[in-house]
Amino acid sequence: MTKHSYDSEKPINDATDHLRQHQGLPAKRGGKLPVPIKVLGFILFGVFGIISIIGVIVSLLN
């Protein structure tokens, strides 16, 4: 899959030209979390999962 360069493409119409010139495009792809937040999320969900499994096992033994 190739990445498109928006600067070299001819605009389809005036609306897309306006969007490119005045509003701009994001410089880089967003949506990535920093590594410490990812690790914290994995730990929290992991602990929650383990406690849930232990709770089910303990409730079945009683």
Image: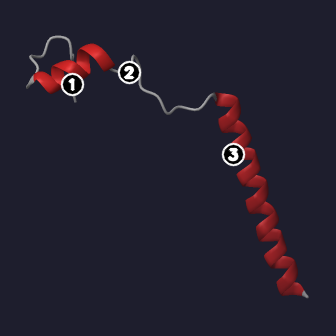
- Type of amino acid at the residue the image marks with label 3: Phe
| Secondary structure of residue under mark 1 | loop
Residue in the image at 24% along x and 22% along y: 19
| Secondary structure of residue under mark 3 | helix
Nearest to N terminus: mark 1 or mark 2: 1
Query: Residue 60 placed where, x, y %?
Result: 83, 86
Using the rendered view, name the quadrant where residue 48 is placed: bottom right
Residue in the image at 62% along x and 28% along y: 34
Tell me if label 3 and label 2 are in contact, CB under 8 Å: no
For residue 7, side relative to residue 55 (left or right): left
Label 1: few (<14), some (14–19) or many (≥20) C-alpha neighbours in 10 Å: few
Count of all numbered marks drawn on residues in the image: 3
Above or below, 48 against 42 in this view is: below
For residue 28, side relative to residue 41 (left or right): left
Of residues 38 and 8, which is closer to you in this image?
A: 8
Residue wearing tag 2 = 26
Distance in Å between CA atoms under marks 1 and 2: 18 Å
